Amino acid sequence: MKTTGSIAELRDWLAALPRPIGFVPTMGALHAGHMALVQRARAECATVVASLFVNPLQFGLNEDLAKYPRDLVGDRERFANAGVDVLFAPDEAVMYPPGFSTTVDTGAIGTKYEGAVRPTHFSGVTTVVAKLLTIVAPDILYVGQKDAQQTAVLRRMVTDLGFPVAVEIVETQREADELALSSRNAYLTPEQRAAAPSLHRALETLRDAVASGAKKNDAVVRARAALDPLGAPDYLDIVDADTFEPIDSVRAPAFVIGAVRFGTTRLLDNLWIRK
Ligand code: AMP
């Protein structure tokens, strides 16, 4: 696996590599969830490019940028072992040169749920991914279902700005007890870790209650009751998979979404209702 932090060098290498190019953007601290994206890209593409960049633009002022887990050596090894051809690991000055002031804003879809709690988050994500797509020019972008609203925001951006790339969503990878894999799980105390799988159970409760005829508000009350008392929900809801507008049924395509705080750690999860 070749690694570079230089845009010019990356472009030189990619010009000589076969298409299709599959691209997996990450912030590192790799786990089996990230690797599922790489494996899918490896199975479907002649060339696999990954990026590793902890994007300051998508962290709010009081968020965990400084303590976000970093393991460049371990991550390089994991990417190499999974068959990544080229790793792009730029410094901040490469992604955000002095005077950087351009951002990408996808409007309403990025203002609710995660966008309501983290007002600058999605413009940080779309800005960095727009720049990465311009640099890498992949044929297929691989993103995780785990960050469902992010998948909707990025699909919106790709359509609106006409990026010539297909977006593939890879199913959420989970621990044996159904807790979705996340770099932030490492912050949980043992008690919080034991309570965390109740988020997934709450989402199933919400889905099943609405599917069997309950009104959504009543179903949300039941879902909250399925949560461990250590978990404080920010939201539990059902949304259209494309627009992230709330809906009252579990018709496809939709996501049953939830965000719950366990102490200072905020966990996200969702169920994907597919056709
Ligand atoms: P991150 O490094 O957290 O920005 O994540 C990089 C990519 O991995 C994003 O597309 C995430 O949605 C995806 N991802 C993170 N966790 C999981 C998971 N448990 N299962 C599948 N994909 C995931």
Image: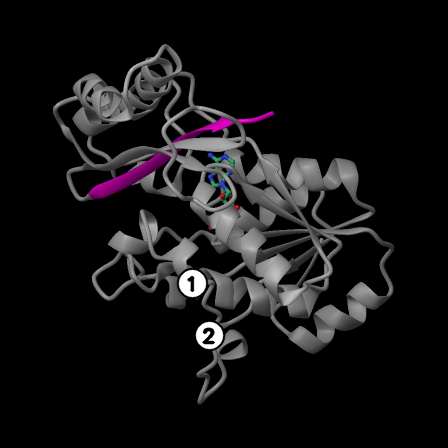
Can I make out residue 127 in this image? Answer: yes
Instruction: Give the prevailing secondary structure in the magenta stretch.
Output: strand
Coordinates of residue 26 in the picture (x, y in percent): 52, 52
Q: Secondary structure at mark 1?
A: helix
Coordinates of residue 64 in the picture (x, y in percent): 27, 56
Residue type at numbered disc 2: Thr
Q: In which quarter of the view is residue 38 placed?
A: top right
Q: Nearer the viewer, mark 1 or mark 2?
A: 1
Q: Quadrant of the C terminus?
A: top right
| Position of 229 relative to 166 (above/below) | above
Residue at the extreme top of the image, as rendered: 212
Q: Secondary structure at mark 2?
A: loop
Is residue 183 inside the magenta stretch? no
Mark linked to residue 161: none
Coordinates of residue 240 in the picture (x, y in percent): 46, 38
Coordinates of residue 35 in the picture (x, y in percent): 58, 37
Q: Nearer the viewer, residue 197 or 275?
A: 275
Q: Nearer the viewer, residue 271 or 184?
A: 271
Q: Is mark 2 within 8 Å of ligand 1?
A: no
Q: Nearer the viewer, residue 71 or 204?
A: 204
How far is the residue under mark 1 from the one under mark 2? 12 Å
- Colouring mode (rainbow / by chain / secondary structure / one colour): one colour
Residue at the extreme left of the image, as rendered: 229
Q: Nearer the viewer, residue 156 or 203?
A: 156
| Position of 20 relative to 184 (above/below) | below
Q: Which residues are magenta?
A: 265-275
Task: Check disc 1 and report the residue beneath it.
Answer: 107
Numbered label tally = 2
Task: Check disc 2 and report the residue beneath it.
Answer: 103
Residue type at numbered disc 1: Gly
Please tell me which residue is depicted at 40% across the width and 25% down the height of the picture. Answer: 249
